[in-house]
Image (tube, rainbow, N blue to C red):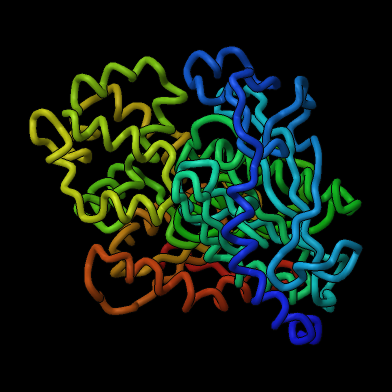
Amino acid sequence: MSIFRRRSAAVFSVTAVTAVTALALGTAASAVAAPGVPPSLVESDPTIAQPATDSFYTPPAEIPDNPGSLIRSQFAPQLLDAFDVGDAPGRADKILYTSTTQNGEKVATSGVVLEPTGKWTGKGPTPTLVFAPGTRGAGDDCAPSRAGVQFAGVNLSNAAVNLNYEYPFYAAASAMGYRVIVADLIGLGTPGQHTYVNHTEEGHAVLDAARAGLAFSGAPEDSPVAFYGYSQGGGAAAGAAEHAASYAPELNVKGTFAGAPPASLDAVAGAIDNHMIEGVLGYALNGALARHPELASLQDEYFNDEGKRYMASTANECIGNSVANWAFRDTRTLTKDGRSFSEIIRDDERLRNVLLDSNYKLGSRALNAPMMVLNGRNDDTIPWGQARDTAADYCASDGTVKFVTDETPSVLPRSVINHAVPMISQVGTGFQYINDRFNDVPAPSNCGQF
């Protein structure tokens, strides 16, 4: 805190300028295709062959084969320590590392590592908390690591707003003595379409961020690790927990906090219709099309001109821009036959088989460490029932699971209030759970009681 007090005036005086220019000063994309991407991905997602607007995020001609391998790093000033360039407490560095898609193709993925600002006083060596970010959008400008001083930025060329609203959580975890790693997730920051709520790819990105971040920090491979996320991040954290045993068995996973995870897209799609953050359905559909080009014809089959505009717009928007463009839109106005998106998902076997398979639906794999799942009973965005059912699925696979219900009363449905409030009010619950796991306190379970 003394560092913050000494520098706060200077930091806040330049924050606005830094945040506005940090994204806008990237190098212009050239017509030369970006190297380091599998040809099979270029066929289904041509955007992955384009260089990033910031050269740090463009992969080299060859990327390491092993998932979690560090490709490069770069000092990244953060809000509380914007002028530190040495090994001061809380130093942040961007990392680019190898991860893999749902089909095992290697891709470059980005994130950031924040060293602790506080001293770890708990049991064992310095623990590492890997954050999976909540919804930021689908465009590269929205990646957490691209935010100016890791907090906020605006790309003046397209008005994309990047607000890293979970930064206070990262700072708090760092103050508790944790090493913090934030995974941008596949296609968010780096070339290619972001595969929004594809829990396999998000889980891979989180696990590989842990690997790369530990290696970058010089920490032992078996350092204690935990995952934390809310909303999209809750799904990604749960995805990492599901895949840890098979994909990254060497990691010493202590536990996971998964807040409001979008565990079943059919349920979420119904809740999001006519909602303030209506645009997130476009993020999910665009990501699915990038991995399943055989579904491309569905756009002409189902979407009217406004629906096609919606798909094109949401492919590269940040969440604030999507709210401005698509808030409270009835998806029946975007389709040729007047059916909603959730009805089409329910009725079309081709789409249902993709969006409800094990890449998108949580709960089909056993956990290798305890988990807390939290959801608001009146959550207006991520339905409580599908989170409860997922926790029950983990219990059925002999998981040690604590399911917590937030009882915030319903306020302005479809305004995202009942989704956002527990993210803030329950952060202490999540941190306490993780801290207990790092200190080897026996994990609680209420399986069969919710």
Q: Residue at x 33, y 70 (%)?
A: 418
Residue 103 lies, with reference to residue 363, above or below; the image says above
For the residue pair 123 and 209, the one nearer the viewer reads as: 209
Q: Is residue 345 left or right of residue 58?
A: left
Question: Residue drawn 68% across and 69% down?
Answer: 79
Which quadrant of the view contains residue 20?
A: bottom right
Is 439 positioned to the left or the right of 145 in the image?
right
Quadrant of the frame with the N terminus:
bottom right
Instruction: Single out the residue that lies furthest toward the left.
Output: 337
How many discs appear?
Answer: 0
Q: Position of residue 141 (x, y in %)?
A: 54, 46
Can residue 157 be seen here? The reply is yes
Q: Is residue 416 above or below residue 183?
A: below
Residue 174, given in percent of the width and then of the height, sits at 74, 70
Q: From the viewer's side, name the closer residue of 195 and 139.
A: 139
Rendered location of residue 71, percent (x, y): 80, 35
The answer to which image quadrant residue 177 occupies is bottom right
How far across and down, in percent of the image, does residue 161 sit?
47, 55
- Picture residue at 38% right of the left edge, 52% below the top: 321
**Residue at 29% of width from left, 50% of height from top?**
325
Specify the quadrant that holds the C terminus: bottom left
Q: Considering depth in this image, is 11 or 98 the residue closer to the camera?
A: 11
Does the rendering let one see residue 450? no
Q: Is residue 104 above or below residue 360?
A: above
